[in-house]
Image (cartoon, rainbow, N blue to C red):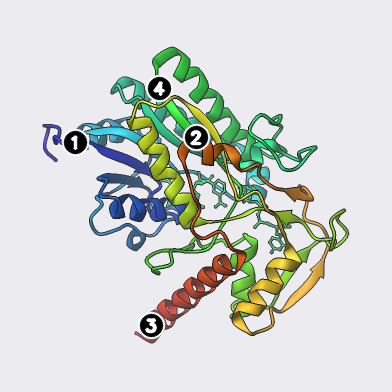
Amino acid sequence: MTSEPVPSSRVLVTGGAGYIGSHVLHALADAGIPAVTIDNLSTGRRQAVPASVPLVEGDVGSPALLDEVIREHGVDAVMHFAGSIVVPESVEKPLAYYRNNTVSSLTLLDACVRHGIDKLVFSSTAAVYGAPERVPIDEDAPTAPINPYGASKLMTEQMLRDAGAAHGLRSVILRYFNVAGADPAGRTGQATPVATHLIKVACQALLGQRPALSVFGTDYPTPDGTCIRDYIHVSDLADAHVLALLHLRRGGDSLILNCGYGRGASVREVVRTLESVSGETVPATLGPRRAGDPPQLVSAAARIRERLGWVPKHDSLEEIVRSALSWERRLDQERAGRDGA
Ligand SMILES: NC(=O)c1ccc[n+]([C@@H]2O[C@H](COP(=O)([O-])OP(=O)(O)OC[C@H]3O[C@@H](n4cnc5c(N)ncnc54)[C@H](O)[C@@H]3O)[C@@H](O)[C@H]2O)c1
Ligand SMILES: O=c1ccn([C@@H]2O[C@H](COP(=O)(O)OP(=O)(O)O[C@H]3O[C@H](CO)[C@H](O)[C@H](O)[C@H]3O)[C@@H](O)[C@H]2O)c(=O)[nH]1
């Protein structure tokens, strides 16, 4: 490594080898915005990172590594994706979640302040709202997480607010609803080893990679008895990140924005849509409720459009499930190629 900073500003993307981070790295590369990523590859994959982006393998909780990367690459802004994301696991191992999500974020914020970086885009979650009293949920709704994952993210939001007031660190906090689908060009997708998200699990069941999808609860107070979620295509979410970065680079103020389409789909609707795009049946069993699932989570979606001028391009459940299925088929072929080699 050289000791002189390079002249062009790069955005530091933490967790860029993961599902959402890798889509954002591709979106940044497509927009001609230089980036560097730190990832410890705990759930991410090296091959998800675009060839043009330097991947520094290491932990975002290391102050020395952050110092080195920020100096070496002339970092002027940060997008923070690295973290642990499985809700039930956060209930079993809360301290691990507070360490990897909250404590590591504290280390990162500290590094930003130390290096005079005043722009940060943060991956938050609708889980900060807990089980909301009303849908659609707007950004001013009360935050009341019902699991350590959501609490660990809300604590980081609080640190960002306080660091903004004290140190001028401006942030865009993006609260994602249910992220799904894959890059339409097939460059990346969700490849994390533990699949728990509905659309990925349903695709895996359809392809015979698991015996069946278990539908978690059919007695919810919703029209068909199954839970309703606001599914957002990961490529639209990636575009929102690029817009958030540009907003901060223009000198824009701190924002908290929901990321969703403002429209819900039930578990049964998701399954039907997957069946209609594939022409095949999803093997499914009707099971009991999963602990901690609110009946409905739907975003109030106006603010992000107003503040960032975000216009979704893939706003259809068909497109989301089609891209997720074709990504799952691609992973299948990759595995078959490896096994055959
Ligand atoms: N997937 C969703 O539906 C969803 C919803 C809301 C919020 N989020 C948030 O979005 C972010 C990205 O989620 P994802 O779905 O892409 O998950 P992911 O597991 O695919 O990506 C996380 C990446 O961070 C890396 N990582 C984890 N801990 C690290 C550490 N300490 N140091 C360096 N790298 C580390 C992992 O190797 C991985 O590449 C997370 O912060 C998550 O909480 C995701
Ligand atoms: O095998 C499965 C998996 C899920 N579901 C159901 O499908 C819906 C969606 O579940 P996911 O696990 O895909 O997503 P969650 O809604 O639980 O949570 C996700 O979306 C949240 C915001 O809406 C947070 O962002 C959180 O981090 C993220 O994991 C839920 O009703 C769930 O009960 C099933 O029926 N069977």
Upstream in sequence: badge 3 or badge 4: 4
Residue 189 x, y percent position in the rendering:
45, 63
Q: Which residue is mark 4?
A: 169
Q: Position of residue 37 (x, y in %)?
A: 32, 46
Q: CA distance from mark 1 to mark 3?
A: 38 Å
Of badges 1 and 2, nearer the viewer stands: 2
The amino acid sitting under disc 1 is Glu
What is the C-alpha distance between the residues marked 3 and 4? 47 Å
Q: Are marks 1 and 2 in contact (CB under 8 Å)?
A: no
Q: Amino acid at mark 4?
A: Leu
Q: Which residue is mark 2?
A: 307
Q: Residues within 10 Å of mark 4 (few under 14, many from 20)?
A: many
Few, some or many residues within 10 Å of mark 3 (<14, 14–19, 20+): few
* Residue picked out by circle 3: 337
> Considering only vertical position in the picture, is 37 above or below 2?
below
- The residue wearing badge 1 is 72
Of the 4 image quadrants, the one containing the C terminus is bottom left
Q: Quadrant of residue 78?
A: top left
Which of marks 2 and 1 precedes in the sequence?
1
Badge 4 or badge 1: first in the primary sequence = 1
